[in-house]
Amino acid sequence: MRIIINGLATEYLDEGRGKTLLLLHGWQDNLHTFDKLAAKLAEKYRVVRLDLPGFGETETPRRAWNLEDYAEFISAFCRKLGIQVFCIIGHSLGGRISIKSLSGSILNTEKLVLIASAGVAKRNPVRSGALLALARIGNAAFSIPPLRNLKGSVRRSFYKAIGSDYEAAGKLRGTFQNIIREDLSDAAKKIAAPTLLIWGHLDRETPLFDGQRLSNLIRGSRIEIVEGAGHFVHRERTGRVADLILHFL
Amino acid sequence: MRNVAVIFGGRSAEHDVSIITAHIPVIETLLAGRKYDVVPIYISRAGVWYSDSAMNNLEYFKEDFEPKLRRLKPLQLSFEKGLEIIEPGIFGKKKKIDIVFPTMHGTYGEDGSLPGLLRMANVPFVGCDLSASAVAMDKAFTKQILSAEGILVVPFVWFTKSEWEADNKRILEQIARLKSPRFVKPVHLGSSIAITKVKSEAELVNAIEVALHYDDKALVEESVEDLIEVTLPIIGNNEPRAAEVEHALNKTEVFDFNEKYLSGGKKSVGGVNRAYSEIPANIGEEVTSKVKEMGKQVYRILGCTGIARVDFLIDGKTKKIFVNEVNTLPGSLYHHNWRKAGVSNMELIEELIRLAEERFASQKNTTFTFKSDILKKVGGPKIGA
């Protein structure tokens, strides 16, 4: 289904009946990442999910967005659909947006589930600073002929080596930079809603260490670790994740 | 050999579908016939014109072809002696185009823009002319004209984006007089883009916003329940000839873009997919005959020439037949249907070229200019006084 939110044609799905669960997907993903999970949750709840701006079939914003823009967008989406969200469930980037939304006054929900959520600095600031400096030096060095011809391939190799989505971000590069720049440690401390964190033991994108750190920051939260699963734990172990969520709710 | 230019792609949501129609069946049939030199002209999504003989092969477009386009120089056109293309290069060799086969769906093509350009260029071209194309592209105009001529259409309300923004209350009151459920449609877009079936007032406003996001004019119409949806391809100029009445069996509440073009996963079977069609439609002789008669009537009223397809909504209970819309460039020319009607691809393409030349010759016999002394009178006594 399609709806216009703040001038953007937005694709969403609305299934089931009962208290409303809002599902937010991750970076370069779309609402179908939750197909299997939503089917299980919709047996007892109303499950609403959408393609976030820039992903899936939802239009891309004309300027680079930051997390607050995404949070405001989610709030506008809920107002337009006339839904009072009981629990927000965010995976990866969706987790970042959820933390941002619930830490201020943008959105109020009774509960929060974070699945392999991003948002707290995953590596130490010294390493990030060093990589940023290296990227800047490289950019300057490879602007000089004849090295200029190698710039594209070296740049791709560099970002691949450090495990960054930056190269693949395309039109969303500005948005990507805005999002990863924002550390949500302080925001996480402000969350008052009961929170469940679900993490794949083998997650490489947002390592378990990040999850444990996030769990320490969110008062009264609980972390559940799923053995043998990676970053897309909700797809890899749908049954287990659904059980954890339903039990928590 | 005479040169036939097949123009496809374009600044339209149906850009990709156009590439399929151009190749299946048009280019592949023209090449097989070996009667014409086929000049493929591709217009990019940004509106840049290109031509390269490699584009005669559909494979050219299957992978990411942007890098290949970047190596080509845009095409230049000349209208000096009919339509000529100027090949990129220092000498800029000109090639005269004898006939154009437009296969551009939607905006800037099927909406009359391309026929208008080709009229200006004074070159014969296949398919409907400017006025029929422009009217058929606007679902509200089509219904208004047909209704005035006594053809049955479902009750509807139309409005522009600025009218909606200025006074949506008045428009909602008008819509409230239509029976529910209703369809909301942008009037100019094809392929079911942004069409929504609504059952409640809340859904209605959202659906209108979606339609007006993609178009500056929308319509809301009553839905026909117990629906039998049929379509009828027609060719001809003054003596329209109908193919078979076709019943689309993809019975979802409304086809969305993907379902309409890619359903069944048989991507290129017959070009635009028709895997679930019933040809001829099993609707009885009497209704079939009425549909064919109405189709030809509609074709004449809108001034269609060359080819068009008329879509009908039949109420399964009352057997009332409503005309839904007219498409002046049926996807892949509905060649699968013509085959069932006993017309091969070769016969279809050759007939369409013959019809284009017939119309062009007929237009040559029409006097478009006349001498007047109006310019001499400028600044003198009041004209018409």
Image: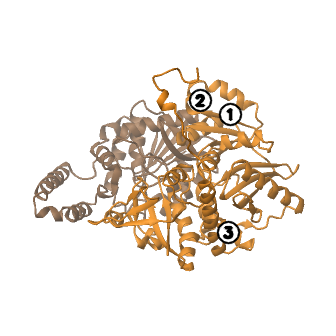
Chain colours: A brown, B orange
- The answer to whether marks 1 and 2 mark residues whose Cβ atoms lie closer than 8 Å is no
Against B24, residue B218 (above or below) is: above
Against A138, residue B176 (above or below) is: above
Check chain identity for marks 1 and 2: say if they share one. Answer: yes
Q: Which mark is residue B201?
A: 1
Against B96, residue B293 (above or below) is: above
Residue B86 visible, this angle: yes
Instruction: Give amino acid for label 2.
Output: Trp
Mark 2 falls on what kind of element? helix
The quarter of the picture where residue B306 lies is bottom right
Q: Position of residue A249 (x, y in %)?
A: 55, 44
Density class for disc 3 (Cα within 10 Å; few <14, some 14-19, many ≥20) is some
Q: Which mark is residue B164?
A: 2
Check chain identity for marks 2 and 3: say if they share one. Answer: yes
Residue B58 visible, this angle: no
Check chain identity for marks 1 and 3: say if they share one. Answer: yes
Chain name for mark 2: B
State the separation of the CA atoms marked 1 and 3.
36 Å
Q: Earlier in the sequence, mark 1 or mark 2?
A: 2
State the separation of the CA atoms marked 2 and 3.
39 Å
